[in-house]
Amino acid sequence: MAGIYIHIPFCRQACHYCNFHFSTSPRLKNDFIDALLKEIALSNVYTGNPCIETIYFGGGTPSLLLPEELQLIFDALFQKFTISCDAEITLEANPDDITVPKLGAWRTMGVNRLSIGVQSFFNEDLQWMHRAHNAAQSVDSIRLAGEQGFENITVDLIYGSPGLSDEKWHRNVQQVVDLGIHHISCYALTVEPKTALHRMIAKHKIPDTDPAQQARQFILLMQWLEAAGYDHYEISNFSIPGKKSRHNTAYWQGKSYYGFGPSAHSFNGTDTRSWNIANNALYIQSLSGNIIPSEKEVLTPVQRLNEYIMTGLRTMEGIDLLYIQKIFGAQQVNRIVQDARRYMNEKVVLENNTLRLTPTGKLFADGIAADLFEDSNPGQVFNLTNPPSIG
């Protein structure tokens, strides 16, 4: 199987914490769509022309596109690729973009999963985040999507932000549970360089994030959602059994995917990845000359092993030592187990040839992974951070 990621690099306004690639000016939108259609047409299909099992529209804010613009992209994809009849097709949407006409158009095109960027159900939080929607729209958008036939919905929430009490965090989580949402993605607020949030903290306009608060709210989150029947299947993702994101799961399992649009990444499922330039104007200019503006790298065995450790450790399945022995050799298995001994039982458990994080260990996922890397620097332990932007 393979997946497709489409990056739509436009937003209504810039959230203070966001460092993804986007523009708040729609001036180049028509030219971008033309360039995107050309990139899809010019793309080289991986060996064997694999059937596409998942499509994910991310950004940016894909829900800003007009239905007719989105339809053009669907037409190009179905002309170029073989799309499975039961493909999971996800569209990221902001609450303020969700209307009955749009929901109907999305369903007609084949969208069967919505990822709604709620972040909070409190107006004061949404305002300082500089979100374009309000708390009432957060609730209404979810209810409206359900009424229009969308059964597969995921909601994004942010925790660990200044001013977010444990009580408010609980009310945010409980609101999603009460609305019957089967998939929840929760991210610790991260202060990224060159963002408005970074500048405001540097100027002491708002407090910095508190690692102790973030750790506590993450632990509470795990407890609340476990009690509500959700599987914690990846560090930042929770789902009712059977409702995992198929698209993101394929990333963590190292399966192949195509990325289209500025800043989008691709991976051939074995050792080669590529990424497009993160500049709308240059992306459009290059494709006007029938050139896909991308760079490529071939991963070394060490890079492949380290990436498997990093992604595998974040999931409920953990790291399969038999797989590592088969692909990378028994010596690597012995080294990894030896390096993991300092974390055994409290942060890491070894069962049935699998290394998995405990709930406590999930607080230190990045640091533990780094200590298990080949050629890593042992001893450095980091608190929980957000995953990289991969859609």
Image: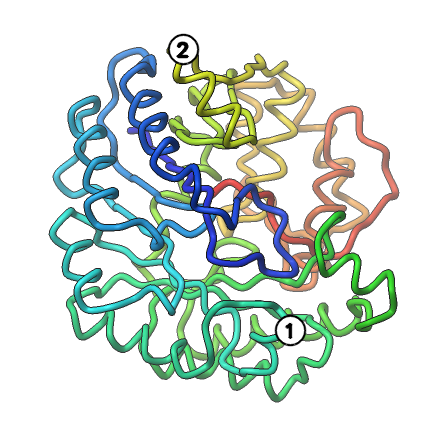
Task: Tell me the crowding category of disc 2: few under 14, some 14 to 19, or many 20 or more residues within 10 angstroms, Cα based.
Answer: few
Question: Most extreme residue toward the bottom, as rendered?
Answer: 167
Residue 354 vs residue 259, the one in the foreground: 259
Counting from the top left corner in percent of width and height, residue 289 is at: 40, 10
- The residue tagged 2 is 289
- Residue 141's place in the image compared with 387, above or below, is below
Question: Most extreme residue toward the front, as rendered?
Answer: 27
Q: Please identify, in this view, whether the residue under mark 2 or under mark 1 is nearer the observer.
A: 2
- Residue 131's place in the image compared with 35, above or below, is below
Counting from the top left corner in percent of width and height, residue 315 is at: 52, 49
Q: Earlier in the sequence, mark 2 or mark 1?
A: 1
Q: Which residue is located at x 66 percent, y 63 percent?
A: 189
Q: Which residue is located at x 44 percent, y 24 percent?
A: 284
Quarter of the picture containing the N terminus is top left
Q: Which residue is located at x 11 percent, y 52 percent?
A: 108
Evaluate if marks 2 and 1 touch, with contact meaning CB atoms under 8 Å apart.
no
What is the secondary structure assignment of the residue under circle 2?
loop
Q: Which mark is residue 128?
A: 1
Q: Which residue is located at x 18 percent, y 75 percent?
A: 147
| 59 on left or right of 89 | right
Residue 338 vs residue 7, the one in the foreground: 7
Counting from the top left corner in percent of width and height, residue 291 is at: 43, 11
Residue type pointed to by label 1? Trp
Residue 42 vs residue 346, the one in the foreground: 42
Residue type pointed to by label 2? Gly
What is the secondary structure assignment of the residue under circle 1?
helix
| 161 on left or right of 285 | right
Q: CA distance from mark 2 to mark 1?
A: 42 Å
